[in-house]
Amino acid sequence: MSDDEKYVCPRCGSTQEFRRVEIEQSSAALLFFGGLLPYLLSNANRKNMVLCERCHYVFAPKPAYSLTGCFILLILAAVLVFVIYTYASGR
Ligand SMILES: [Zn+2]
């Protein structure tokens, strides 16, 4: 067993007893709230999840996903502000 696959459960904090799982579930709620890009990113990432054997919590093993998601949300927010600003000052 290699040591480069150590995860930390975000719910119970356990660092042991994880199992890789593949999950396919509808992301309609995420699509509704988060937009298309986070939806696609989530779908791409959702194929490889990790299950905590202690509390049965399923989470994405790569923290880079959340960084990417935040980055995209930041861009979307910037675009939204730009559109609102343009609309407000364009009359
Ligand atoms: Zn856990």
Image (cartoon, helix red, strand yellow):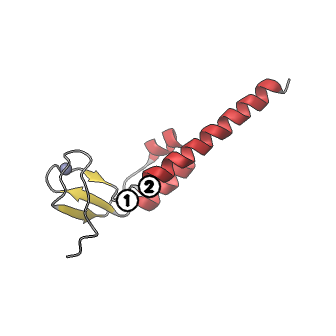
In the image, residue 4 lies at what x, y percent?
Answer: 28, 70
Dot 2 and dot 1 residues touching (CB under 8 Å): yes
Spatial distance from mark 2 to mark 1, Cα to Cα? 6 Å
Q: Which residue is at the front of the view, 6 or 35? A: 6
In the image, residue 29 lies at what x, y percent?
Answer: 44, 42
**Residue at the disc numbered 1:** 62
Look at the picture and state if 50 lies above or below 28.
below
**Left or right: 79 with respect to 12?**
right
In the image, residue 80 lies at what x, y percent?
Answer: 66, 36
- Please tell me which residue is depicted at 31% across the width and 63% down the height of the picture: 22
Look at the picture and state if 20 lies above or below 74.
below
Kindly identify which numbered label has been placed on residue 24. none
| Amino acid at the residue labelled 1 | Lys
Q: Secondary structure at mark 2?
A: helix
**Residue at the disc numbered 2:** 65
- Please tell me which residue is depicted at 24% across the width and 51% down the height of the picture: 9
**Left or right: 15 with respect to 82?**
left
Q: Secondary structure at mark 1?
A: loop
Residue 5's quadrant in the figure?
bottom left
Specify the quadrant that holds the C terminus.
top right
Q: Which residue is at the front of the view, 61 or 4? A: 4
- Please tell me which residue is depicted at 23% across the width and 50% down the height of the picture: 57
